[in-house]
Image: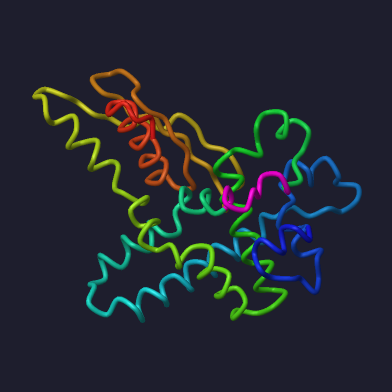
Amino acid sequence: MKTLEEKIGYTFRDRTLLENALTHSSYANEHRAKGMPSNERLEFLGDSILGLVVADHLYRNRPDLPEGDLTRIRAALVCESSLVEVAQSLDLGSYLKLGRGEDSGGGRRRPSIQADAVEAMLAAVYLDGGIGQARKLIHRLILDQEGERIANGRDYKTALQELVQRESGQVLSYRLVGESGPDHAKTFSMEVRLNGQTVGTGEGRSKKEAEQAAARAAVGKLEGTEE
């Protein structure tokens, strides 16, 4: 834990908050007798804190932009892919407490689990050190790389539509193929089809986010870059 604290530049007064932030529900369920809570409640709080800090930053620093552009940029900064980049930069997956099944099934690399852990960690910092410390961490991990993360938040559905329209008669469709998790933290799985053939699949915390992830996979496949 000390190594992770050094990476994020924050030392916890109550380190159990950080441990809680890294505890997946699969681990909590396996250790229910010990009363081990999962990070789902922290993830819920962290999502709101992240949204507030990013919105406040954009409002104050982008006075020239209308509401629609602010919304688009905020979405790019707080989306799952942006949070996964944060998790990977911290090697957060190696610190997670996962159940045996989730761990053996590749849970440490699962985007939704990594993204949720980042939000839970932000909430843990907020509860331990206040909104000022949480804001500093969000700036360090996300807002200081704002331009790069906005670029990574590209509208892949539009990009895919433009790509396939180069040839006439192409038909794109999206289909929900699964959903999991509790009501407040569902993960949706989508696939995108081109002329009836699956060309990409993706997951997200909303159907729109899952569609973007599927479209991103499809763009990578069709362009030969496998994004």
Q: Quadrant of the N terminus?
A: bottom right
| Residue sitting nearer the eye, 3 or 208 | 3
* Main secondary structure of the magenta stretch: helix
Horizontal side of residue 225 vs 11, given as left or right: left
Please say if 95 is above or below 60: above
x and y percent of residue 102 in the render? Answer: 70, 34
Please say if 42 is above or below 132: above
x and y percent of residue 16 in the render? Answer: 81, 63
Please say if 206 is above or below 49: above
| Outermost residue to the left | 168
> Is 137 part of what is drawn in magenta?
no
To which quarter of the image does residue 55 belong?
Answer: bottom left
Seen at 11% across and 22% down, the residue is 169
Magenta stretch bounds: 87-95
x and y percent of residue 217 in the render? Answer: 38, 32
Q: Quadrant of the C terminus?
A: top left
| Residue sitting nearer the eye, 207 or 15 | 15
To which quarter of the image does residue 162 belong?
Answer: top left
| Residue sitting nearer the eye, 153 or 41 | 153
Seen at 19% across and 26% down, the residue is 171
Horizontal side of residue 190 vs 120, given as left or right: left
